[in-house]
Image (cartoon, helix red, strand yellow):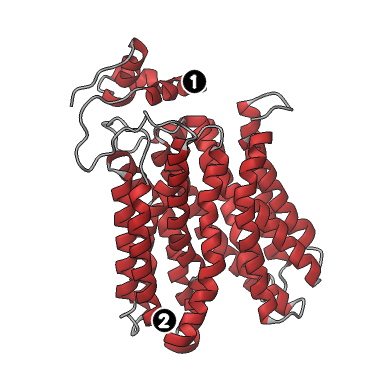
Amino acid sequence: MSRTSNSAASASLNQLTVNDTHSSAASAASKVSNGDFEKQIQQTETASATATPRWWESKSLEHKPLDGAYGWIVVASGCVMLMFSMGCVNSYGMYQTYYHLVQFPDEHVSTLSWVGTLQFGVMNVFGIPAGILCERVDTRLVSFVGGVIMAISLIIASFCDDAIWKLIITQGIVFSIGASLVFIPSTSIPAQWFTKRRALAVGIVVAGSGIGGLWLTPATRAMIDQLGTAWVLRITGIIIFAVNSVASLFMRSRLRVQTRDKIVDFGVFRDMRFLLIFIGAVCATTGYFTPLFSLPSFAQQVVGKSNSFGTNLLTIINAASTVGRIGTGEVARLLGNINTMVMCTFVSSLSILVLWLPFQVGGTLIASSIVYGLFCGGFIGLLPVVMADLWGVQRISTIIGLLYMANFAGTMVGAPSSGAILDNIGNGTNYKPTIIFSGVFMLCSSMFFVVLRAMVSKKVIERI
């Protein structure tokens, strides 16, 4: 496929990053400084391929204005798709309760929980191939296929009422593969359509998962009580197919990415800034799930509250998280994206170590839930924005796919370790070691982001 470079610098970049056939060019590329790397990314974003795209490839829409009306249509599309994909992940607890009490009463809870764990874990680890597909295939087609896979997996799961391993495969693994094909374009493509309102746009998209958790969880519980899990899975699958099929029509990439010889470019790991974000994300996700999993049982066992009070705490976190993911987009316009991300992780750690750890009172649990929901949601929404600021939007799908490997690692370490600490050190009733575990990892995350901020700018007071 022939190409036309716009300048000598662009041609040089293509020789380094695309053709990469000469060993001397590879050696020179490995020595590129952070500043030169940024210039290369910016040059790549301005280059456009002249060849006519094939039917499965994205067409360039660079003629459409940034921060324009179509960008908000893409945002609405991504928000709706995450509402159902992540909403199903967030509502799995309703299925697990029914499986444990009715459908599989002889199975251990730890076995049943693998369905929900794999839903989130596999979705993140499949982010790399999903990002590759977003670069090489029309993102509308990628997100449509993801919706089809999610729908089929739930419908098949509705007939798997005789063995939990079948649900682990269908409702757990296969569903999460489809969810990844929806999640990656939904969180990466909107950043291509905005500059001034990028943080707000991505925040609205990721708020869809919180909105989905708010209404889909009680709706799922009500339907299970009336119909049982089989029909709920079928109904949910049909709804996902219908809604996602329409929403995916508008998930269009603005930039057409030029084809590379390398399917996955791990060169970004040579950039210390990416390593700091990666390690910080591992720490954040390691501590992230402890409040979600342990606050309800803590309220009942330690504070003496009812089961409904514990459930309401999760509702508060989901509601506050929805507000936080949108609100931090506006805060980031004033303070800067990296500054706001540092603030979000630091305040999240304080909500755990200062509001939750020392107190055993219902009022402080509510306060901790509100503060934690507001700021942990902001951190999640800002990650794609910071990636776009540092490395541009041209390769953002692949870079975000690599970053979400950190979420997978944090999830696989954090959730099991939190439960093991409670069982083995806290003897099932002393939650303080578990709370400290969560808060310290969240605090460490903020420290890594502070170092990142110092690398990007040496000025103490600067919007960055």
Query: In the rendered view, does 10 fall on the left or right side of 436?
Result: left
Tell me where residue 253 sits by quadrant: top left
**Where does the image place residue 229, in percent across and percent down from the top left?**
41, 81
At x 36%, y 35%, the residue is: 265
**Cβ–Cβ below 8 Å for labels 2 and 1?**
no
At x 69%, y 57%, the residue is: 372
**Where does the image place residue 287, in percent across and percent down from the top left?**
62, 56
Mark 1 secondary-structure assignment? loop
Residue 234 visible (yes or no) = yes
Determine which residue is flagged by label 2. 229
Front one among 443 and 320 = 320
**Where does the image place residue 19, in percent across and percent down from the top left?**
26, 24
Q: Is the N terminus in the top left, top right, bottom left or bottom right quadrant?
A: top left
Mark 2 secondary-structure assignment? helix
At x 48%, y 60%, the residue is: 83
The amino acid type found where label 2 is placed reads: Thr
Front one among 156 and 220 = 220
Number of the label disc, if any, that sits on residue 425: none
Mark nearer the N terminus (2 vs 1): 1
The amino acid type found where label 1 is placed reads: Ser
Q: Is the C terminus in the top left, top right, bottom left or bottom right quadrant?
A: top right
Give above or below for 43 relative to 192. above
Front one among 384 and 219 = 219
Query: In the rendered view, does 269 fall on the left or right side of 292?
Result: left
Determine which residue is flagged by label 1. 33
Query: In the rendered view, does 354 fall on the left or right side of 228?
Result: right
